[in-house]
């Protein structure tokens, strides 16, 4: 027997919220302000590192001066530039087309899990990343919605809006293992943040239905390190967070190899499902900084834009 | 050799071991539980594993041994290594010598006694414990109670009477035939005329089983300490020639510090004399001599004040307690204390001479005291006639009122040398006569005399003169009178007439004089003591125990049994008079464990028909405690291991438990030492802050505005001081006299708020002490506008009057124009603040002396006025805000008034810091010039 397997796990059961609304509301309410603050911080750091779209648009970033064409509104003239010469100039800004981004943050019971290897549980990380992404997107001029809960909006306080929507719909969110099927517009982008422990087939079907209406987007798989490395030893009884029977594993170490293979397979299946539907597949480990995940997600969404 | 169980029936519990074994086999440890979201994935890998059918063998062994250890502990296993336990049903009488000779080997004696008790307990017989010092007849008790009493026994610092024990032994033998009698002896023959030996013999003849236990330790003791002018000596006794050939002695002072060590050789004698070769100053500090390595009261002897050197009583006329450096008492005490014991009159004594004479000094020193005919004069005359030495110092009082207790007639008034009005320079000393008492002392040329009293040039003056100045006038004269002598220094004993009192020569001269003085013997023999009692009713008083020795020879609080002794008590220590220091007033006498002529005689065991058996603790080893400890450890290990097997906590839990165990083992023994360290007080941070930088301070009144104003005012004044003078004070401090230490602040500003509660008497005493020690307080009633001449005092004024009743204030006056306080930095007429009408009161100066002839432009006392009272609200005028703007308007107003207020503040601070420096005549010319303008 080995004494090195000191990994501990915790599970904050989100389903418990269903039993007592006030407790659920209070718990989420206690947690959300912190997550919102962190989301703002992360969004700020991510925005700082991004580049513009290199196209004229309605953005705030300067793109180019062009000569004034008669018939344009006089208010568009950039007088400072025009005063330097005889011609009138219009100041153009970068192009920014607004998309509708639908965010789905998995609040199901398995997300309440964290191990001692991670800095926080998966749900916190998922919400942080989702809200930060919403903030970044709105700053970029996009419209963001919580899939199934709010209509797309481009408000400065989008983070607070999404947070309060999630708070209000805490019960419904806790039961969603998969993103809900909804009618999406053709310019819709769907961003799903989850641990994707549900069967890959069901997920693939859902993604297909999104792709059918022309929606694209990204999947971010939030992984607790212990789920990948399986650092358990000795006689162990595994308790399913999704309500299944406990699994008595005997000496857990003997399962490590097989589990790792099986988990990698599962991940590949999810990635295949995403790619089949034209979605980008990303992973994020909860022992890494959240900003890393947010940046990767933002960059990949730009990539989606560029591909189109 | 014997191994037995106290409760063998408990061993039946061992039968449960198989049951435990079986239970452990069928109930394996619980697996560790882990929440894991991808459990479904695991489940796809393989079906549930079967539960392990076995508990690991080592866990089984651990738990079985735990259970076994518990069962064995219950059974109470006892192992006795030496002899099979005496199984004797009769009662036992245990006689223990508990005088001081037992103390060095007390632990062994207790262990031996404990072994006897254990044997009796196991044999089921009753025990009577009879310590020699016990005042009640021995009680028959069971072993447990006897053991408790035994633990409470301590060796006594005296020799208990063994004849009492002999009578008890005889009684016991009569009452309990066939009993066992055990005597734990200290091996010394006591002063009981062999009564005990006879009783033992009779008991043995009556058929009792008599045993005598003792050890080979040879008792050592000290007796007859003598501290005379030559050396400090003490007699060392040993009980037999078989004892150690040498003894090592050490001398200690009253704080227990070792002053010196000496090794003494017995040279095959029972008695030897040890001499400590120490300087007399060090020797006089010795209060206790002890034989090193011998922890008994007998090996300690005490030195009281009577065994030390001469006692000197010092009386000064008009001594000023507030300024010790200006008091002759200070110089005399410093000069005399290295080689004599000085006594001073109590505060406020009506007749200090009578009080001090009752303490029977060898020498009386009078510093500038005139002796009008009266009781004191008669007593001093008698003192000199009977052999006392009287040393007098001149001074203004003596110079004007000569009496007959002088070696020579004096001329009226003194003469001043080298002063402002004298042409002559200060005189120095000539060499001392080679035949005089000061012969051989270096006539230090540094000594100069500015003033002296002159002797009338009577015939025989030269013979009386011990020391002269270089113009031939006598400096020290002396005369024998009766059995004693009178010595006169023609200067005074402080530094105002000459610098002799601060020279090393002064000490040497006094030492010669004290050595010359007759040794008026203290109450060393009964006759003398009686005579003393007759002549001095004071000495009939009793001496209360102050600190007494315990049996081990440690000084401590007196035992509750200790009773006062009367003067002249010389006898050896007894239960009611344990050895130690006894005091009455200032006098301390010592009661010794052994009287001077005591000897140590070994007990003749053969004559008593006894064979001495060595002290031996027949120890019984009780395995209960180690077994229980073992079970506890096994339990802890088991808890750790089982959590390990179920994989729950791993090393983390183990580490925590190991840490706790380590703490228990490591920290516990050090607890006491740690506690000791903690008790050492550390200086409070704010005290350190206050002490490190000089700063102004104000007294917190509780009124917010007054406090803020005071703070702002002092800040403004501090800025002005830093800008204009070389004194750069730190931030002003707020002080609460009830709580804070005041000693750090040279000056306190105290704004009076009528509504504030009066400080407590204790606080007032603290403030008064602060003023006495040289602090200055500026009371500001801030009510100059409200005051009208003739009106009743304002509330603030009344508050100050009430408060000052507790302060013992000197006479006050409105600061006169020539007071040094108006000259210390700026030349000022008065001290203004927000108002200008109020007066400033300071301590009254002494009336101007005619001595200097012409009026001096500046007057000052030698000290700083401890109190300044104003009503002009000084702080209000000094106060400025952060931008340097004044905070309050002035009445009548103007920048000039503000400037003058600041100048007044600067002067006040300079006055408290420099005192009378500006009254020095060095500045006279400048001052005169500027005043003349």
Image (cartoon, rainbow, N blue to C red):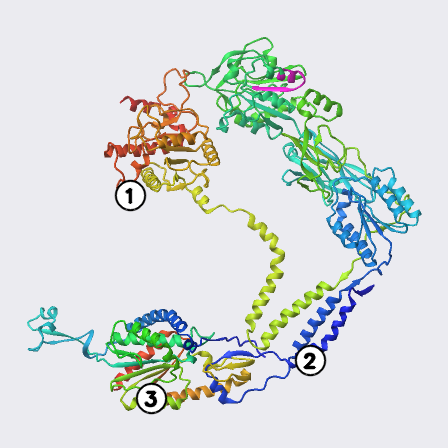
On the image, the x and y values in percent for residue B889 come to 25, 37
On the image, the x and y values in percent for residue A8 come to 50, 75
Asked if the residues shown at circle 1 and circle 3 are in contact, with their CB atoms under 8 angstroms apart, the answer is no
On the image, the x and y values in percent for residue B404 come to 59, 12
- Residue B387: in magenta span: yes
Image-based side of B615 in relation to B347, left or right: right
Q: Chain of mark 3?
A: A
**A89 is higher (above) or lower (below) than A218:** above
**What's the residue at 65%, 22% (across, down)?**
B516
Which quarter shows the C terminus of chain B?
Answer: top left
Quadrant housing residue B78: bottom right
- The residue to which callout 3 is attached is A207
Q: Which residues are magenta?
A: B379-392
User: Which label belongs to residue B544?
Assistant: none
User: Which label belongs to residue B881?
Assistant: 1
Count the marks: how many?
A: 3
Which quarter shows the N terminus of chain B?
Answer: bottom right
| Label 1 and label 3 in one chain | no
Alpha carbon separation for disc pair 1 and 3: 73 Å
- The residue to which callout 2 is attached is B22
**What's the residue at 61%, 84% (across, down)?**
B52
**B189 is higher (above) or lower (below) than B859:** below
Q: Closer to the camera, B881 or B199? A: B199
Secondary structure beneath dot 1 equals loop
Q: Chain of mark 2?
A: B
Q: Chain of mark 1?
A: B
Q: Closer to the camera, B84 or B27? A: B27
């Amino acid at each position: 027997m080995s004494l090195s397997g000191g990994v501990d796990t915790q599970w904050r059961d989100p389903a418990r919220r269903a039993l007592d609304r006030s407790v659920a509301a209070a718990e989420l309410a206690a947690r959300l302000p912190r997550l919102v603050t962190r989301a703002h911080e992360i969004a700020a750091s991510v925005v700082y590192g991004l580049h513009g779209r290199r196209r004229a648009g309605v953005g705030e970033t300067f793109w180019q001066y062009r000569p004034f064409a008669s018939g344009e509104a006089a208010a568009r003239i950039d007088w400072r530039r025009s005063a330097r010469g005889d011609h009138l100039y219009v100041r153009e800004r970068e192009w920014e087309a607004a998309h509708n981004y639908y965010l789905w943050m998995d609040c199901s019971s398995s997300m309440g899990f964290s191990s001692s290897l991670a800095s926080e549980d998966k749900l916190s990380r998922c919400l942080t990343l989702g809200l930060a992404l919403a903030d970044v997107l709105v700053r970029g001029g996009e419209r963001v919605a919580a899939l199934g809960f709010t209509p797309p909006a481009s408000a400065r306080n989008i983070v607070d809006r999404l947070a309060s929507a999630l708070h209000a719909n805490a019960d419904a969110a806790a039961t969603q293992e998969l993103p809900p099927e909804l009618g999406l517009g053709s310019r819709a982008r769907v961003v799903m943040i989850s641990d994707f422990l549900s069967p890959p087939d069901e997920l693939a079907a859902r993604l297909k239905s999104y792709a059918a209406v022309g929606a694209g987007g990204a999947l971010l798989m939030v992984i607790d390190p212990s789920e990948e490395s399986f650092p358990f030893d000795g006689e162990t009884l595994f308790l399913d967070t999704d309500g299944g029977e406990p699994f008595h594993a005997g000496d857990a170490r003997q399962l490590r190899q097989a589990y790792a293979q099986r988990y990698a397979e599962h991940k590949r299946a999810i990635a295949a499902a995403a790619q089949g539907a034209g979605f980008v597949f990303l992973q994020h480990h909860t022992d890494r900084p959240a900003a890393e995940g947010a940046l990767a997600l933002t960059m990949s969404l730009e990539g989606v834009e560029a591909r189109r | 050799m014997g191994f037995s169980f106290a409760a063998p029936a408990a061993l039946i519990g061992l039968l449960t071991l198989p049951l435990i074994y079986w239970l452990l086999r069928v109930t394996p440890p619980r697996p560790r539980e882990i929440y894991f979201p991808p459990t479904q994935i695991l489940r796809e890998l393989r079906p549930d594993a079967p539960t392990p059918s076995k508990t690991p063998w080592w866990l089984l062994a651990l738990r079985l041994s735990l259970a076994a250890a518990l069962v064995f502990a219950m059974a109470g296993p006892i192992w006795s290594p030496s002899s099979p336990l005496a199984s004797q049903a009769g009662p036992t009488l245990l006689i223990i010598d508990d005088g001081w000779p037992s103390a060095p080997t007390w632990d062994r004696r207790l262990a031996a006694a404990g072994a006897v008790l254990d044997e009796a307990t196991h044999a089921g017989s009753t025990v009577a414990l009879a310590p020699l010092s016990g005042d009640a007849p021995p009680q028959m008790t069971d072993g447990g109670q006897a053991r408790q009493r035994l633990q409470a026994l301590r060796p006594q610092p005296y020799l208990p009477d063994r004849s009492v024990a002999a009578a008890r032994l005889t009684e016991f033998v009569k009452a309990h035939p066939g009993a066992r009698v055990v005597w734990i002896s200290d091996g010394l023959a006591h002063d009981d005329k062999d009564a005990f030996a006879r009783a033992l013999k009779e008991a043995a003849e009556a058929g009792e089983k008599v045993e005598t236990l003792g050890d080979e330790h040879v008792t050592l003791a000290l007796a007859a300490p003598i501290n005379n002018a030559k050396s400090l000596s003490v007699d060392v006794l040993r009980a037999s020639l078989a004892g150690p050939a040498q003894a090592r002695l050490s001398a200690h002072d009253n704080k227990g510090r070792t002053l010196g060590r000496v090794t003494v050789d017995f040279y095959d004698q029972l008695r030897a004399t040890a001499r400590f070769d120490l300087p007399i100053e060090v020797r006089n500090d010795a209060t206790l001599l002890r034989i090193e390595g011998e922890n008994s009261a007998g090996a300690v002897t005490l030195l009281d004040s009577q065994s030390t050197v001469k006692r000197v009583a010092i009386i000064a006329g008009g001594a000023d307690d507030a300024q010790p450096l200006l008091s002759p008492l200070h110089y005399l005490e410093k000069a005399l204390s290295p080689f004599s014991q000085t006594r001073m009159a109590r505060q406020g004594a009506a007749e200090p001479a009578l009080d001090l004479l009752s303490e029977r000094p060898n020498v009386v020193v009078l510093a500038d005291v005139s002796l009008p005919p009266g009781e004191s004069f008669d007593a001093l005359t008698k003192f000199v006639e009977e052999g006392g030495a009287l040393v007098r110092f001149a001074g203004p009082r003596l110079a004007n009122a000569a009496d007959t207790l002088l070696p020579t007639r004096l001329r009226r008034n003194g003469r001043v040398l080298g002063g402002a009005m004298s042409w002559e320079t200060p005189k120095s000393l000539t060499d001392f006569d080679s035949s005089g008492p000061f012969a051989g002392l270096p006539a230090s040329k540094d000594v100069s005399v500015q003033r002296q009293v002159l002797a009338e040039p009577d015939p025989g003056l030269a013979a009386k003169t011990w020391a002269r100045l270089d113009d031939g006038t006598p400096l020290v004269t002396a005369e024998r009178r009766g059995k004693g002598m009178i010595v006169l220094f023609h200067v005074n004993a402080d530094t105002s007439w000459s610098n002799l009192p601060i020279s090393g020569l002064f000490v040497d001269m006094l030492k010669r004089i004290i050595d010359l003085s007759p040794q008026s013997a203290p109450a060393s023999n009964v006759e003398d003591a009686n005579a003393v009692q007759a002549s001095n009713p004071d000495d009939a008083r009793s001496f209360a125990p102050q600190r007494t020795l315990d049996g081990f020879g440690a000084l401590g609080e007196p035992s509750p049994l200790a009773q006062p002794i009367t003067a002249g008590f010389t006898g050896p220590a007894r239960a009611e008079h344990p050895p130690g220091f006894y005091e009455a007033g200032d006098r301390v006498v010592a009661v010794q464990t052994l009287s001077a002529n005591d000897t140590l005689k070994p007990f003749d065991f053969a004559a008593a028909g006894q064979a001495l058996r060595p002290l031996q603790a027949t120890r019984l080893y009780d395995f209960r405690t180690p077994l229980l400890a073992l079970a506890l450890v096994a339990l802890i290990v088991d808890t750790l291991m089982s959590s390990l097997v179920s994989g729950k906590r791993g090393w983390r839990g183990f580490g925590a438990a190991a840490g706790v165990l380590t703490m228990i083992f490591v920290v516990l023994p050090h607890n006491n030492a740690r506690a000791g360290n903690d008790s050492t007080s550390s200086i409070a941070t704010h005290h350190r802050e206050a002490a490190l930088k000089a700063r102004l301070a104000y007294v917190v009144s509780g009124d917010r505005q007054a406090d803020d104003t005071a703070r702002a005012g002092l800040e403004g004044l501090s800025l002005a001081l830093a800008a204009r003078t070389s004194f750069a004070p730190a931030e002003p401090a707020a002080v609460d006299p009830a709580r804070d230490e005041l000693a750090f602040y040279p000056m306190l500003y105290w704004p009076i708020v009528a509504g504030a509660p009066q400080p407590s008497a204790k606080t007032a005493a603290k403030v008064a002490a602060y003023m006495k020690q040289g602090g200055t307080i500026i009371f500001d009633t801030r009510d100059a506008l409200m005051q009208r001449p003739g009106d009743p005092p304002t509330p603030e004024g009344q508050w100050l009057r009430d408060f000052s009743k507790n302060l013992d204030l000197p006479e006050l006056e409105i600061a006169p124009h020539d007071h040094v306080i108006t000259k210390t930095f700026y030349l000022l007429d008065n001290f203004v603040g927000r108002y200008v009408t109020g007066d400033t009161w300071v301590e009254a100066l002494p009336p101007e002396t005619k001595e200097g002839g012409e009026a001096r432009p500046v007057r000052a006392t030698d000290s700083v006025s401890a109190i300044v009272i104003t009503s002009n609200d000084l702080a209000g005028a000094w106060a400025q805000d952060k931008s340097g703007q004044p905070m309050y308007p002035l009445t009548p107003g103007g920048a000039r008034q503000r400037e003058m207020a600041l100048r007044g503040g600067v002067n006040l601070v300079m006055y408290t810091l420099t005192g009378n420096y500006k009254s020095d005549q060095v500045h006279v010319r400048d001052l005169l010039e500027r005043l003349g303008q």
